[in-house]
Amino acid sequence: MISVFEALARAFRDLFNLRVLWVVIWPLLAASVLWLALGWLFWETISGWIAAGLAHLGILDWLDGIEPRWIANGVQALLHLMLYPLLIVMTALLITALFAMPALIRVVAERDYPDLERASGGGFAGSLVNALIAIVLFAGIWLLTLPLWLLGIGVIVPFIAAAWLNQRLFRYDAIAEHARRDEMQTLFKQQRAGWWGLGLLTGLVQWVPLLNLLGPVLAALAFIHYGLARVQALRLRPPPAV
């Protein structure tokens, strides 16, 4: 049974598979084009929403007290710009989870788990619901913890939030095609520490410049390796004694 670190190492190896390279590119490209287009078309509307959110959190009142004004304006512009990379990464993760996972699962399963039976315990509807819940809660975590940035402890928020998002978003899709429904529930409960550990490691990758471009697909591959190894190990366990 492979460890969290071995799952991540195998994910790095699979990034250089020709069948994976296109999957690395198109979710990030699609997310970038989407948000650049939305930002260009609806910049005033989006800026208004951001300003309203900052006002609700009390950040605008804090900025109004900063002198000289160019520093306050710079901080506000930086907060605006910080949201766009976040939105692009979140969207790329969502696209990868919903549409790229089947291709990645085929690559991993054919190479490392060819004899693992597919039980189809989950489906696209379950994946969609899981992804929407993950994204909404992740966005909520970011918005609710924005004031912590003013206290200096907000720097830990992105890492914890990314770890939570990755494990919540990818663990379901990683095993949905192969595990039965009861096996999925068992693995979600019994392997909670492993899912979180892998979520933290892949979340850290998303904050490394250039390497973060590979982040969504790397996370997906790592969770597939880890999840399928757990399904295989679960089925090899001897039945409990009667």
Image (spheres, grey):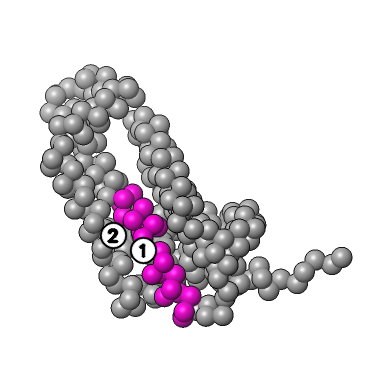
* Mark closest to the chain's N terminus, 1 or 2: 2
User: Is 74 on the left or on the right of 161, as rendered?
Assistant: left
Q: Position of residue 167 (x, y in %)?
A: 48, 54
- Say which of 218 and 111 sits in front: 111
Q: Position of residue 80 (x, y in %)?
A: 22, 37
- Disc 2 on helix, strand or loop? helix
- The boundaries of the magenta stretch are 89-111
Please tell me whether the stretch drawn in magenta is mainly helix, strand or loop.
helix
Query: How far is disc 1 from disc 2 in space, using C-alphas?
Result: 8 Å
User: Is 220 on the left or on the right of 44, as rendered?
Assistant: right
- The residue labelled by disc 1 is 100
**Res 71 seen here:** no
Q: Quadrant of residue 78?
A: top left
- Disc 1 on helix, strand or loop? helix
Residue 138 lies within the magenta run: no
Circles 1 and 2, Cβ within 8 Å, touching? The answer is yes
The residue drawn where x is 19% and y is 53% is 33
- The residue labelled by disc 2 is 27
Give the amino acid at mark 1.
Ala
- Say which of 19 and 164 sits in front: 19
Quadrant including the C terminus:
bottom right
Q: Is residue 228 above or below residue 47?
A: below
**Res 49 seen here:** yes
Q: Is residue 191 above or below residue 5?
A: above
